[in-house]
Amino acid sequence: MPKITYITNDNQSHTIEVQNGLTVMEGAVQNDIPGIDADCGGGMACATCHVYVKEDWLNKLPKKEDGEEDMLDMAFEPKKNSRLSCQLLVSNELDGLIVSIPSKQG
Amino acid sequence: MNKIDALIIGAGPTGLFTAHQLKLIGLNCEIVDNLEKIGGQCIELYPDKPIYDIPAIPECTGEELTNNLINQLKPFNIKFYLGERVEEVKKEKDNWLVKTNKGNSFLTPNVIIAGGVGSFEPRKFSIKECEKFENKSLFYSITDKKIFKGKIVSIFGGGDSALDWAVELSKDCKVNLIHRRDEFRGAKTTVDKVHELAKEGKINLYTKYQMTAVSGLEKLESIDIKHDNEEIKNLKTNYVLGFFGLIMQLGPIASWGLNIDKKKIEVDTEKFETNQKGIYAVGDICNYPGKLKLILSGFHEGALAARACFKLARPNEKYRFEFTTSSKTIKDRLGIKGD
């Protein structure tokens, strides 16, 4: 199973095996990683599953849809490497992905 | 003080349909919602976006769904308290005493929380110092645009609210419009208008900038904005407006003594009752094994919670299951004549 590393706000690193087909958001929520609220449940309607993707992964990820970029306008402190984790589908290609969770979601 | 059979908190689809269920079985109810409009997330987050999984409705928008639910409630005269937030829920003998932030109070044996993911609040700037200026020279909504006349106003955001206000205020203020990227997500006509006004020098457009600092003693005097390439600009400004949409906060619900885990209220699947007798949670805000955050699940949960309300509101009567197609009593309640 692909391994995803979540770095939480307190600088703790949590590496978790996430099943193919789940999203990076679901991987966090199902494993009680704090800081990903995902209020809307993965509908790209709330921006509370916002993460920062480690720079060297940016170009390896599927491109953002317009709707994702629109929602990121509303995220807490968005940066160039901001993504909504509900839009990142876990696959073998994502094995080793590292994301950081912002200090808060709203 | 209003004495009622049930109070519903939240006027989204689940709250509306739960009201319908309560009225069908002969209970009265009233609805409180923090938003100014009926419809909850459907109206606030996706009024124009299509929904494809409402049973028997192949496709409808959030707004159409809301309007249909309101129409369905037409036979009943249900009182709505909009723009009001429930602050307090306290036990009073066999009833709950519920108070809102606008001074309304209700005495009821049944409180149904259909609160979505809590109440919508504006998203705020992340800079701590902004709090000091909030509602004085920094705003997240506008109630009186006259105060900006002749002043320098810096507007942040890339959606319709930010763009509409930039266009409107550019008529008699000096407007800075600041957004984190080049693209705006507002209506195309408004985006075009903003670019036109920027060309004419009526709006100062700063894209790929975000705010990094605010300064001023009593009133706001200037702000720092930082470009993606790290360059910092200092802008003199009298007012700052932030339009970053809404975020959902659990708010006062967290202090009502309910079992809450990850912002969700735990309920049973027979009555959708919480750990407090007579307080139910339905729709997105509740959680139980197998919970699906679908509108159709909210409808089911509301229907069962309504039956549970009957027992507490009419302790000396027996609830009798009836179909709307055949029950004379229900047809009377719906105001349907003869057949």
Image (cartoon, rainbow, N blue to C red):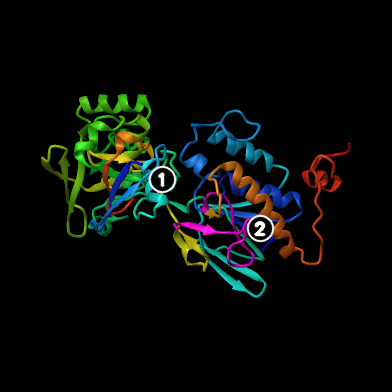
By secondary structure, the bulk of the magenta-drawn segment is best described as loop
Q: Which residue position is annotated with label 2?
A: B271
Image quarter of residue B279:
bottom right
Question: Residue B116's x, y, as percent?
Answer: 51, 50
> In the displayed structure, does residue A73 sit left or right of residue B14?
left
Give the residue at x 72% y 51%: B23
- Looking at the image, is B15 positioned above or below residue B277? above
Question: Which of these two is toward me, A83 or B169?
Answer: A83
Give the residue at x 80% y 44%: B323
Q: In the rendered structure, which amino acid carries the disc numbered 1?
A: Glu
Circle 2 crowding by C-alpha within 10 Å: few under 14, some 14–19, many from 20: many
Q: Which residue position is annotated with label 1?
A: A26
Queried whether the magenta region covers residue B156, the answer comes back as no
Residue B183 shows in the view: yes
* Tag shown at residue B54: none
Q: Chain of mark 2?
A: B
- Looking at the image, is B289 positioned above or below residue A86? below
> In the displayed structure, does residue B95 sit left or right of residue A6?
right
Question: Residue B207's x, y, as percent?
Answer: 21, 34
Q: Residue furthest left?
A: B231
Question: Which of these two is toward me, B272 or A46?
Answer: B272
Give the residue at x 28% y 58%: B131
> In the displayed structure, does residue B183 sit left or right of residue B273?
left
Question: Residue B105's x, y, as percent?
Answer: 59, 65
Magenta stretch: give its range: B262-285
